[in-house]
Image: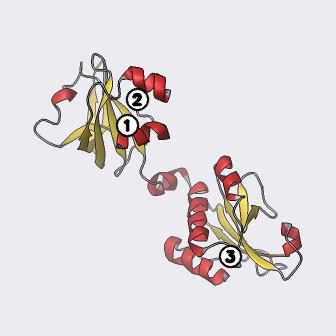
Amino acid sequence: MREFVFDYIKKKYKVLPEYPWRKYDMNAVFRHTDNNKWFALVMEVGREKLGLPAGEDVDVINLKIDDPFFKDVLLQEDGILPAYHMNKFHWISVLLDGTVAWERVYELIDMSFAATASSKKKQKIRPPKEWLIPANPKFYDILHAFDDADEIEWKQGSGIKTGDTVFMYVAAPVSAILFRCKVTETDIPYDYADKNLTINALMKVKLQKRYQPDRFTFDILKEEYGIFAVRGPRGIPNSLSAALKK
């Protein structure tokens, strides 16, 4: 059954297994091509070594999970165990005997690939994110920015990429989130600087939704969602994300 894993990794990531141990020639490592880090280790292990009832050896795949809380949730699932022969704080062992559905195995391989990727690759492969970004009406007429077009150019914040969602928080005297936009293009060359503002690149954002000025005010953001300042691009809590999508 390990061949299904090998085939998935080969097709999706163009990576072939390596067999670095002569004594354990069934154990295969998969590495990133740029930083050489492991993202998967397929091993043949005795069941008793995994804390399971004794029996025939079983194939497992060791995978890295960055989020320790999510890892603890995974360990409640059948067939997912603390990592054998690796750091149990960051890694898990997944049985490859059919106990864990293949779709779940592939999902966990993808997570491990992302967790062990280089910074450049992580930025490229990460899923779309949601951002809260500031807009100051003293420097730009953001209140009327979408009157004549549903897509405008805006200062690109660090970490934002095409496909992300940005919620525009308009500063005083409005002090509220007014717009939800989809980022349609990034890294547009631009060079501007004055005493109030420096812009090194622009992005294009397309309007998706308008909010009433009294719906997501600064006071509501502070009291209900724990947001006390919006000075630059920042992530948003899940509770606010859900409210903004209603």
Residue drawn where x is 87% and y is 69% of the image: 49
Q: Quadrant of residue 216?
A: top left
Residue 194 vertical placement versus 244 (above, below) = above
The color scheme shown is: secondary structure
Apparent side of residue 230 relative to residue 58 in the rendered image (left or right): left
Which numbered disc, 3 or 1, marks the residue that appears first in the sequence? Answer: 3
Q: Mark 3 — residue?
A: 18
Which numbered disc, 2 or 1, marks the residue that appears first in the sequence? Answer: 1
Q: Mark 1 — residue?
A: 157
Determine whether label 2 and label 1 are within 8 Å by CB.
yes
Q: What element carries label 3?
A: loop
Residue 170 vertical placement versus 31 (above, below) = above
Task: Residue at the far front: name it.
Answer: 246
Going by the numbered disc 1, the residue's amino acid type is Gly
Going by the numbered disc 3, the residue's amino acid type is Glu
Q: Quadrant of residue 17?
A: bottom right
Q: Can residue 158 be seen in this view?
A: no
Work out how far the residue at label 3 is from the one at label 2, CA to CA, in angstroms. Answer: 44 Å
